[in-house]
Protein backbone atom coordinates (compact mmCIF):
# COMPACT_ATOMS: atom_id res chain seq x y z
CA UNK A 1 0.00 0.00 0.00
CA UNK A 2 1.43 3.35 -0.99
CA UNK A 3 0.95 5.65 2.00
CA UNK A 4 2.34 8.61 0.09
CA UNK A 5 -0.41 8.30 -2.54
CA UNK A 6 -3.08 7.91 0.14
CA UNK A 7 -1.72 11.01 1.92
CA UNK A 8 -1.73 12.96 -1.36
CA UNK A 9 -5.31 11.87 -2.07
CA UNK A 10 -6.34 13.42 1.23
CA UNK A 11 -4.15 16.51 0.72
CA UNK A 12 -2.35 15.55 3.93
CA UNK A 13 1.35 15.67 4.79
CA UNK A 14 2.96 12.24 4.79
CA UNK A 15 3.81 12.52 8.50
CA UNK A 16 0.25 13.45 9.38
CA UNK A 17 -1.06 10.51 7.41
CA UNK A 18 1.28 8.11 9.22
CA UNK A 19 0.14 9.50 12.55
CA UNK A 20 -3.49 8.89 11.56
CA UNK A 21 -2.67 5.39 10.28
CA UNK A 22 -1.02 4.61 13.64
CA UNK A 23 -4.13 5.82 15.41
CA UNK A 24 -6.25 3.69 13.10
CA UNK A 25 -4.31 0.47 13.75
CA UNK A 26 -4.52 1.14 17.50
CA UNK A 27 -8.28 1.82 17.53
CA UNK A 28 -9.55 -0.55 14.83
CA UNK A 29 -8.89 -3.77 16.86
CA UNK A 30 -11.46 -2.56 19.39
CA UNK A 31 -14.10 -2.34 16.63
CA UNK A 32 -13.10 -5.76 15.26
CA UNK A 33 -13.31 -7.29 18.75
CA UNK A 34 -16.77 -5.79 19.16
CA UNK A 35 -17.86 -7.28 15.83
CA UNK A 36 -16.48 -10.67 16.93
CA UNK A 37 -18.21 -10.58 20.30
CA UNK A 38 -21.50 -9.42 18.81
CA UNK A 39 -21.25 -12.12 16.16
CA UNK A 40 -20.82 -14.87 18.77
CA UNK A 41 -23.85 -13.52 20.65
CA UNK A 42 -25.79 -13.14 17.39
CA UNK A 43 -26.21 -9.47 18.39
CA UNK A 44 -27.15 -7.92 15.08
CA UNK A 45 -27.22 -4.32 16.42
CA UNK A 46 -23.82 -4.62 18.05
CA UNK A 47 -22.30 -5.97 14.84
CA UNK A 48 -23.89 -3.22 12.81
CA UNK A 49 -22.66 -0.42 15.13
CA UNK A 50 -19.07 -1.64 15.34
CA UNK A 51 -18.75 -2.36 11.63
CA UNK A 52 -20.29 1.05 10.88
CA UNK A 53 -17.62 2.75 12.96
CA UNK A 54 -14.82 0.74 11.34
CA UNK A 55 -16.23 1.41 7.89
CA UNK A 56 -16.21 5.20 8.36
CA UNK A 57 -12.72 5.42 9.79
CA UNK A 58 -11.10 3.11 7.22
CA UNK A 59 -12.88 4.77 4.31
CA UNK A 60 -11.73 8.21 5.44
CA UNK A 61 -8.08 7.13 5.30
CA UNK A 62 -8.52 5.36 1.97
CA UNK A 63 -8.25 1.81 3.35
CA UNK A 64 -10.93 0.72 0.94
CA UNK A 65 -10.56 -3.05 1.35
CA UNK A 66 -11.27 -2.81 5.05
CA UNK A 67 -14.19 -0.43 4.55
CA UNK A 68 -15.68 -2.71 1.86
CA UNK A 69 -15.66 -5.69 4.23
CA UNK A 70 -16.95 -3.58 7.15
CA UNK A 71 -19.76 -2.38 4.93
CA UNK A 72 -20.55 -5.97 3.94
CA UNK A 73 -20.82 -6.98 7.61
CA UNK A 74 -22.94 -3.94 8.44
CA UNK A 75 -25.40 -4.85 5.67
CA UNK A 76 -25.40 -8.63 6.33
CA UNK A 77 -25.51 -9.03 10.09
CA UNK A 78 -28.04 -11.84 9.86
CA UNK A 79 -25.84 -13.96 7.57
CA UNK A 80 -24.42 -17.34 8.48
CA UNK A 81 -21.97 -16.99 11.36
CA UNK A 82 -19.34 -18.91 9.38
CA UNK A 83 -19.45 -16.34 6.65
CA UNK A 84 -19.10 -13.41 9.06
CA UNK A 85 -16.26 -15.15 10.89
CA UNK A 86 -14.50 -15.50 7.56
CA UNK A 87 -14.92 -11.79 6.96
CA UNK A 88 -13.60 -10.97 10.43
CA UNK A 89 -10.47 -13.05 9.69
CA UNK A 90 -9.96 -11.05 6.48
CA UNK A 91 -10.31 -7.81 8.44
CA UNK A 92 -7.68 -8.92 10.93
CA UNK A 93 -5.30 -9.90 8.14
CA UNK A 94 -5.71 -6.58 6.35
CA UNK A 95 -5.28 -4.63 9.57
CA UNK A 96 -2.14 -6.59 10.46
CA UNK A 97 -0.67 -5.76 7.04
CA UNK A 98 -1.22 -2.05 7.63
CA UNK A 99 0.18 -2.42 11.14
CA UNK A 100 3.38 -3.99 9.83
CA UNK A 101 3.78 -1.35 7.17
CA UNK A 102 3.30 1.46 9.72
CA UNK A 103 5.80 -0.14 12.10
CA UNK A 104 8.41 -0.59 9.39
CA UNK A 105 8.56 3.16 8.74
CA UNK B 1 -14.19 36.36 20.46
CA UNK B 2 -11.26 37.29 18.31
CA UNK B 3 -12.85 37.72 14.89
CA UNK B 4 -9.75 36.41 13.14
CA UNK B 5 -9.92 32.99 14.74
CA UNK B 6 -12.78 30.58 14.49
CA UNK B 7 -13.37 27.61 16.72
CA UNK B 8 -14.83 24.39 15.41
CA UNK B 9 -16.23 21.71 17.67
CA UNK B 10 -15.74 18.20 16.28
CA UNK B 11 -18.01 15.51 17.67
CA UNK B 12 -17.47 11.86 16.72
CA UNK B 13 -17.10 8.70 18.77
CA UNK B 14 -14.39 7.48 16.39
CA UNK B 15 -11.03 8.87 17.52
CA UNK B 16 -9.48 8.49 14.10
CA UNK B 17 -12.17 10.61 12.46
CA UNK B 18 -11.76 13.30 15.12
CA UNK B 19 -7.99 13.31 14.69
CA UNK B 20 -8.25 13.55 10.91
CA UNK B 21 -10.59 16.54 11.16
CA UNK B 22 -8.41 18.18 13.81
CA UNK B 23 -5.37 17.92 11.56
CA UNK B 24 -7.13 19.16 8.46
CA UNK B 25 -8.86 22.09 10.18
CA UNK B 26 -5.89 23.15 12.30
CA UNK B 27 -3.80 23.29 9.16
CA UNK B 28 -6.30 25.78 7.72
CA UNK B 29 -5.90 28.02 10.78
CA UNK B 30 -9.01 27.02 12.72
CA UNK B 31 -9.01 26.24 16.42
CA UNK B 32 -10.58 22.90 17.19
CA UNK B 33 -12.34 21.37 20.17
CA UNK B 34 -13.19 17.70 20.30
CA UNK B 35 -15.82 15.57 21.99
CA UNK B 36 -16.18 11.80 21.67
CA UNK B 37 -19.77 11.56 22.86
CA UNK B 38 -22.97 13.58 22.86
CA UNK B 39 -22.91 14.59 26.49
CA UNK B 40 -19.40 16.06 26.33
CA UNK B 41 -20.38 17.82 23.10
CA UNK B 42 -23.30 19.54 24.84
CA UNK B 43 -21.13 20.65 27.75
CA UNK B 44 -18.32 21.91 25.50
CA UNK B 45 -20.70 23.75 23.17
CA UNK B 46 -22.34 25.60 26.07
CA UNK B 47 -19.01 26.45 27.66
CA UNK B 48 -16.98 27.43 24.61
CA UNK B 49 -19.66 28.54 22.14
CA UNK B 50 -17.81 27.40 19.02
CA UNK B 51 -18.44 29.09 15.67
CA UNK B 52 -19.48 25.88 13.98
CA UNK B 53 -20.12 22.27 15.04
CA UNK B 54 -19.33 19.15 13.04
CA UNK B 55 -21.59 16.52 14.53
CA UNK B 56 -21.69 12.76 14.03
CA UNK B 57 -25.19 11.26 14.16
CA UNK B 58 -24.57 7.67 15.23
CA UNK B 59 -22.93 7.73 18.66
CA UNK B 60 -23.46 5.67 21.78
CA UNK B 61 -25.51 7.49 24.45
CA UNK B 62 -26.78 10.87 23.25
CA UNK B 63 -26.76 10.65 19.46
CA UNK B 64 -26.34 13.61 17.11
CA UNK B 65 -30.09 14.27 16.91
CA UNK B 66 -30.32 14.50 20.70
CA UNK B 67 -27.35 16.86 20.79
CA UNK B 68 -28.74 19.24 18.15
CA UNK B 69 -32.16 19.28 19.84
CA UNK B 70 -30.47 20.27 23.08
CA UNK B 71 -28.34 22.97 21.42
CA UNK B 72 -31.27 24.53 19.55
CA UNK B 73 -33.20 24.87 22.82
CA UNK B 74 -30.47 26.91 24.54
CA UNK B 75 -30.48 30.58 23.58
CA UNK B 76 -26.70 30.92 23.61
CA UNK B 77 -26.05 27.89 21.40
CA UNK B 78 -29.15 27.95 19.20
CA UNK B 79 -27.55 30.05 16.46
CA UNK B 80 -24.35 27.99 16.15
CA UNK B 81 -24.38 26.32 12.72
CA UNK B 82 -24.37 22.53 12.95
CA UNK B 83 -23.11 20.36 10.08
CA UNK B 84 -23.93 16.67 10.36
CA UNK B 85 -21.08 14.38 9.59
CA UNK B 86 -22.26 10.88 9.08
CA UNK B 87 -22.19 7.63 7.25
CA UNK B 88 -25.94 7.38 7.23
CA UNK B 89 -26.88 8.05 3.67
CA UNK B 90 -30.57 7.39 3.80
CA UNK B 91 -32.85 10.27 2.99
CA UNK B 92 -34.81 10.02 6.24
CA UNK B 93 -31.80 10.85 8.43
CA UNK B 94 -30.95 13.77 6.18
CA UNK B 95 -34.42 15.24 6.45
CA UNK B 96 -34.56 14.68 10.20
CA UNK B 97 -31.24 16.53 10.50
CA UNK B 98 -32.47 19.51 8.52
CA UNK B 99 -35.77 19.55 10.40
CA UNK B 100 -33.85 19.76 13.66
CA UNK B 101 -31.92 22.80 12.41
CA UNK B 102 -28.73 21.45 10.81
CA UNK B 103 -27.33 23.72 8.11
CA UNK B 104 -25.63 21.01 6.08
CA UNK B 105 -24.66 17.39 5.72
CA UNK B 106 -21.33 15.77 4.93
CA UNK B 107 -21.31 12.07 4.18
CA UNK B 108 -18.54 9.75 5.35
CA UNK B 109 -16.13 8.98 3.92
CA UNK B 110 -15.45 12.66 3.41
CA UNK B 111 -12.60 14.33 1.64
CA UNK B 112 -10.85 16.86 3.88
CA UNK B 113 -11.15 19.49 1.18
CA UNK B 114 -14.91 19.08 1.10
CA UNK B 115 -15.08 19.55 4.86
CA UNK B 116 -12.96 22.69 4.64
CA UNK B 117 -15.05 24.11 1.80
CA UNK B 118 -18.30 23.54 3.68
CA UNK B 119 -16.96 24.88 6.95
CA UNK B 120 -15.75 27.99 5.16
CA UNK B 121 -19.08 28.48 3.40
CA UNK B 122 -21.12 28.16 6.58
CA UNK B 123 -18.81 30.41 8.54
CA UNK B 124 -19.22 33.07 5.86
CA UNK B 125 -23.00 32.69 5.96
CA UNK B 126 -22.97 32.85 9.73
CA UNK B 127 -20.78 35.97 9.77
CA UNK B 128 -23.06 37.67 7.26
CA UNK B 129 -26.18 36.75 9.24
CA UNK B 130 -24.69 37.94 12.52
CA UNK B 131 -23.64 41.23 10.90
CA UNK B 132 -27.18 41.73 9.60
CA UNK B 133 -28.65 41.04 13.02
CA UNK B 134 -26.18 43.42 14.71
CA UNK B 135 -26.97 46.10 12.14
CA UNK B 136 -30.71 45.76 12.65
CA UNK B 137 -30.39 45.71 16.43
CA UNK B 138 -28.35 48.90 16.21
CA UNK B 139 -30.98 50.59 14.04
CA UNK B 140 -33.71 49.57 16.46
CA UNK B 141 -31.65 50.93 19.32
CA UNK B 142 -31.37 54.28 17.56
CA UNK B 143 -35.13 54.32 17.05
CA UNK B 144 -35.72 53.54 20.73
CA UNK B 145 -33.40 56.35 21.70
CA UNK B 146 -35.09 58.78 19.32
CA UNK B 147 -38.51 57.70 20.59
CA UNK B 148 -37.49 58.14 24.22
CA UNK B 149 -36.04 61.57 23.49
CA UNK B 150 -39.49 62.67 22.27
CA UNK B 151 -40.98 61.97 25.68
CA UNK B 152 -41.40 64.80 28.12
CA UNK B 153 -40.05 64.38 31.66
CA UNK B 154 -41.85 65.91 34.68
CA UNK B 155 -38.81 68.09 35.36
CA UNK B 156 -39.26 69.80 31.98
CA UNK B 157 -42.65 71.27 32.93
CA UNK B 158 -42.84 71.51 36.71
CA UNK B 159 -46.05 73.59 36.47
CA UNK B 160 -47.80 70.66 34.80
CA UNK B 161 -47.74 68.75 38.13
CA UNK B 162 -47.59 65.26 36.74
CA UNK B 163 -45.83 61.98 37.33
CA UNK B 164 -45.16 59.40 34.67
CA UNK B 165 -44.48 55.69 34.35
CA UNK B 166 -43.43 54.68 30.85
CA UNK B 167 -42.08 51.31 29.86
CA UNK B 168 -41.73 50.14 26.30
CA UNK B 169 -41.17 46.40 26.09
CA UNK B 170 -40.43 46.50 22.43
CA UNK B 171 -37.59 48.19 20.60
CA UNK B 172 -40.21 50.17 18.74
CA UNK B 173 -42.92 50.77 21.29
CA UNK B 174 -46.61 51.23 20.56
CA UNK B 175 -47.40 53.50 23.51
CA UNK B 176 -46.82 57.22 23.38
CA UNK B 177 -47.56 60.21 25.58
CA UNK B 178 -47.04 63.94 25.42
CA UNK B 179 -47.47 66.95 27.69
CA UNK B 180 -48.45 70.16 25.90
CA UNK B 181 -48.00 73.62 27.39
CA UNK B 182 -50.95 75.44 25.79
CA UNK B 183 -50.70 78.68 27.73
CA UNK B 184 -49.97 79.77 31.26
CA UNK B 185 -51.76 77.40 33.64
CA UNK B 186 -53.24 75.41 30.76
CA UNK B 187 -51.69 72.07 29.88
CA UNK B 188 -52.68 69.26 27.57
CA UNK B 189 -52.03 65.63 28.61
CA UNK B 190 -52.08 63.04 25.86
CA UNK B 191 -51.71 59.24 25.92
CA UNK B 192 -51.97 57.03 22.84
CA UNK B 193 -51.59 53.37 22.02
CA UNK B 194 -50.79 52.36 18.45
CA UNK B 195 -51.99 49.10 17.02
CA UNK B 196 -48.85 46.99 16.53
CA UNK B 197 -45.29 47.52 17.68
CA UNK B 198 -43.46 47.57 14.39
CA UNK B 199 -40.70 49.97 13.54
CA UNK B 200 -43.00 52.18 11.47
CA UNK B 201 -44.94 52.98 14.64
CA UNK B 202 -41.98 54.83 16.02
CA UNK B 203 -41.95 57.14 12.99
CA UNK B 204 -45.65 57.88 13.46
CA UNK B 205 -45.13 58.87 17.08
CA UNK B 206 -42.91 61.68 15.81
CA UNK B 207 -45.73 62.77 13.46
CA UNK B 208 -48.25 62.70 16.31
CA UNK B 209 -45.98 64.86 18.42
CA UNK B 210 -45.76 67.43 15.62
CA UNK B 211 -49.53 67.30 15.01
CA UNK B 212 -50.29 67.81 18.70
CA UNK B 213 -47.99 70.79 18.82
CA UNK B 214 -49.67 72.36 15.79
CA UNK B 215 -53.25 71.65 16.73
CA UNK B 216 -53.56 71.72 20.49
CA UNK B 217 -53.58 75.47 20.86
CA UNK B 218 -55.89 77.86 22.73
CA UNK B 219 -57.70 78.43 19.42
CA UNK B 220 -59.15 74.92 19.24
CA UNK B 221 -61.33 72.99 21.64
CA UNK B 222 -59.85 69.55 22.40
CA UNK B 223 -62.47 67.74 20.27
CA UNK B 224 -61.63 70.02 17.37
CA UNK B 225 -57.91 69.35 17.82
CA UNK B 226 -58.46 65.60 17.83
CA UNK B 227 -60.77 65.79 14.81
CA UNK B 228 -58.11 67.59 12.79
CA UNK B 229 -55.44 65.13 13.90
CA UNK B 230 -57.75 62.22 12.99
CA UNK B 231 -58.29 63.53 9.45
CA UNK B 232 -54.55 63.97 8.89
CA UNK B 233 -53.70 60.56 10.32
CA UNK B 234 -56.21 58.85 8.01
CA UNK B 235 -54.09 60.24 5.17
CA UNK B 236 -50.68 59.27 6.53
CA UNK B 237 -51.27 56.01 8.40
CA UNK B 238 -51.27 52.80 6.39
CA UNK B 239 -54.56 50.92 6.14
CA UNK B 240 -55.51 48.99 9.31
CA UNK B 241 -53.09 51.02 11.43
CA UNK B 242 -54.91 53.07 14.06
CA UNK B 243 -54.52 54.38 17.56
CA UNK B 244 -56.59 54.75 20.67
CA UNK B 245 -55.93 57.91 22.63
CA UNK B 246 -57.02 60.03 25.52
CA UNK B 247 -56.51 63.76 25.45
CA UNK B 248 -57.24 66.06 28.36
CA UNK B 249 -56.85 69.78 28.70
CA UNK B 250 -56.55 71.10 32.22
CA UNK B 251 -57.12 74.78 32.87
CA UNK B 252 -55.91 75.41 36.40
CA UNK B 253 -57.15 78.99 36.33
CA UNK B 254 -60.79 78.24 35.46
CA UNK B 255 -60.58 74.84 37.24
CA UNK B 256 -61.91 73.04 34.19
CA UNK B 257 -60.83 69.71 32.82
CA UNK B 258 -61.82 68.89 29.23
CA UNK B 259 -61.63 65.24 28.25
CA UNK B 260 -61.66 63.45 24.89
CA UNK B 261 -61.48 59.69 24.73
CA UNK B 262 -60.84 57.95 21.42
CA UNK B 263 -61.46 54.30 22.16
CA UNK B 264 -59.00 54.39 25.05
CA UNK B 265 -59.44 53.01 28.60
CA UNK B 266 -61.36 55.54 30.74
CA UNK B 267 -59.62 58.09 32.95
CA UNK B 268 -59.60 57.44 36.68
CA UNK B 269 -60.62 60.60 38.48
CA UNK B 270 -59.69 61.01 42.17
CA UNK B 271 -61.46 63.87 43.96
CA UNK B 272 -59.42 65.06 46.91
CA UNK B 273 -61.65 63.66 49.64
CA UNK B 274 -63.87 61.23 47.76
CA UNK B 275 -63.63 57.78 46.20
CA UNK B 276 -62.07 57.55 42.76
CA UNK B 277 -64.32 56.91 39.77
CA UNK B 278 -64.03 56.20 36.05
CA UNK B 279 -64.95 58.80 33.48
CA UNK B 280 -66.49 56.85 30.62
CA UNK B 281 -67.16 58.83 27.47
CA UNK B 282 -67.67 57.79 23.87
CA UNK B 283 -65.36 58.27 20.95
CA UNK B 284 -64.12 56.53 17.83
CA UNK B 285 -60.57 55.32 17.41
CA UNK B 286 -58.19 57.61 15.52
CA UNK B 287 -56.85 57.09 12.02
CA UNK B 288 -59.67 55.06 10.45
CA UNK B 289 -62.98 56.99 10.03
CA UNK B 290 -63.55 60.33 8.36
CA UNK B 291 -65.92 62.54 10.38
CA UNK B 292 -65.26 60.45 13.45
CA UNK B 293 -67.20 61.22 16.59
CA UNK B 294 -65.44 62.35 19.74
CA UNK B 295 -67.57 63.18 22.74
CA UNK B 296 -66.18 65.99 24.86
CA UNK B 297 -66.73 66.19 28.59
CA UNK B 298 -65.95 69.21 30.73
CA UNK B 299 -65.48 68.64 34.44
CA UNK B 300 -65.20 71.15 37.25
CA UNK B 301 -62.20 70.30 39.34
CA UNK B 302 -60.68 71.40 42.64
CA UNK B 303 -57.14 71.89 43.74
CA UNK B 304 -55.67 68.65 45.06
CA UNK B 305 -57.84 66.44 42.82
CA UNK B 306 -55.95 63.95 40.71
CA UNK B 307 -56.59 62.03 37.54
CA UNK B 308 -54.81 59.17 35.81
CA UNK B 309 -54.51 58.38 32.10
CA UNK B 310 -53.06 55.01 31.13
CA UNK B 311 -52.72 52.43 28.39
CA UNK B 312 -54.42 49.03 28.46
CA UNK B 313 -51.17 47.21 29.28
CA UNK B 314 -51.71 48.34 32.88
CA UNK B 315 -55.00 46.53 33.32
CA UNK B 316 -55.04 43.78 30.72
CA UNK B 317 -52.69 40.87 30.41
CA UNK B 318 -52.80 38.41 27.54
CA UNK B 319 -50.40 36.10 29.39
CA UNK B 320 -52.52 35.96 32.54
CA UNK B 321 -55.77 36.31 30.62
CA UNK B 322 -56.56 39.22 32.88
CA UNK B 323 -59.42 41.21 31.42
CA UNK B 324 -60.38 44.80 31.68
CA UNK B 325 -63.00 44.54 34.44
CA UNK B 326 -60.77 42.62 36.88
CA UNK B 327 -57.80 44.87 36.12
CA UNK B 328 -59.73 48.10 36.50
CA UNK B 329 -61.14 47.12 39.91
CA UNK B 330 -57.63 46.52 41.15
CA UNK B 331 -56.44 49.75 39.55
CA UNK B 332 -59.14 51.79 41.33
CA UNK B 333 -58.16 50.31 44.69
CA UNK B 334 -54.47 50.83 44.09
CA UNK B 335 -55.00 54.42 43.01
CA UNK B 336 -57.23 55.08 46.04
CA UNK B 337 -54.50 53.76 48.34
CA UNK B 338 -51.81 55.93 46.79
CA UNK B 339 -53.39 59.32 47.61
CA UNK B 340 -50.62 60.20 50.04
CA UNK B 341 -47.85 59.41 47.59
CA UNK B 342 -46.56 62.60 45.91
CA UNK B 343 -47.86 62.81 42.34
CA UNK B 344 -44.33 62.65 40.95
CA UNK B 345 -43.86 59.17 42.41
CA UNK B 346 -47.46 57.91 42.35
CA UNK B 347 -47.45 56.34 38.83
CA UNK B 348 -44.34 54.29 39.59
CA UNK B 349 -45.76 53.15 42.92
CA UNK B 350 -49.11 52.21 41.33
CA UNK B 351 -47.52 50.12 38.54
CA UNK B 352 -45.29 48.38 41.08
CA UNK B 353 -48.31 47.52 43.21
CA UNK B 354 -50.38 46.39 40.19
CA UNK B 355 -47.71 43.83 39.22
CA UNK B 356 -46.44 42.80 42.64
CA UNK B 357 -48.11 39.36 42.60
CA UNK B 358 -47.74 38.59 38.95
CA UNK B 359 -45.21 38.13 36.23
CA UNK B 360 -43.68 41.09 34.47
CA UNK B 361 -46.07 43.07 32.25
CA UNK B 362 -46.41 41.60 28.75
CA UNK B 363 -47.31 44.83 26.95
CA UNK B 364 -46.10 48.42 26.84
CA UNK B 365 -47.36 50.50 29.76
CA UNK B 366 -47.83 54.20 30.16
CA UNK B 367 -49.44 55.80 33.21
CA UNK B 368 -49.67 59.54 33.74
CA UNK B 369 -50.88 60.96 37.03
CA UNK B 370 -51.86 64.63 37.15
CA UNK B 371 -52.64 66.75 40.19
CA UNK B 372 -54.83 69.82 39.82
Image (cartoon, helix red, strand yellow):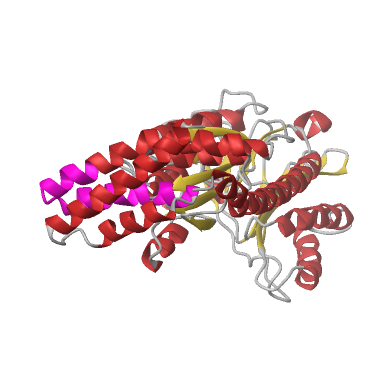
Residue B16 among magenta residues = no
User: Residue at (46%, 46%) from the top-left corner?
Assistant: B55
Placement of the N terminus of chain B among the 4 image quadrants: top right
Location of residue A82 by image quarter: bottom left
Residue B334 in view of the camera: no
- The prevailing secondary structure element of the residues shown in magenta is helix
Location of residue B24 by image quarter: top right
Residue A92 x, y percent position in the rendering: 29, 44
Residue A50 among magenta residues = yes
Residue B177 x, y percent position in the rendering: 72, 46
Q: Is residue B346 above or below residue B331?
A: above
Looking at the image, which is closer to me, A20 or B299?
Answer: A20
Placement of the C terminus of chain B among the 4 image quadrants: top right
Q: Is residue A19 above or below residue A4?
A: above
Residue farthest bottom in this picture: B290
**Horizontally, is B53 left or right of B286 in the view?**
left
Residue B60 x, y percent position in the rendering: 30, 42
The mark total stands at: 0
Looking at the image, which is closer to me, B54 or B244?
Answer: B54
Location of residue B195 by image quarter: bottom right
Residues in magenta, as a range: A34-61
Amino acid sequence: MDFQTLADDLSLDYEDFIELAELFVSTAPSDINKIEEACSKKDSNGMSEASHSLKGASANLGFTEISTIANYIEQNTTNEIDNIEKKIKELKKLLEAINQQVNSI
Amino acid sequence: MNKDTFTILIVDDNKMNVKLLEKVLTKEGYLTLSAYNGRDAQILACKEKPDIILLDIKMPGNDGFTVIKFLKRQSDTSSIPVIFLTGLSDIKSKLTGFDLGAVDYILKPFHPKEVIARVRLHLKLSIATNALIADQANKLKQITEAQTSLLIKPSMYTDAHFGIYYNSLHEAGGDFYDILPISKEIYGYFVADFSGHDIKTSYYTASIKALLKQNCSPVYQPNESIKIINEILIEILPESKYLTACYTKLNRKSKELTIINAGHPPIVYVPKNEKPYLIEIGGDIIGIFHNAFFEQKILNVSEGDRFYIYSDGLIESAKEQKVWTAGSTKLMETIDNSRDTPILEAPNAIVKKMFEDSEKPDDDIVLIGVEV
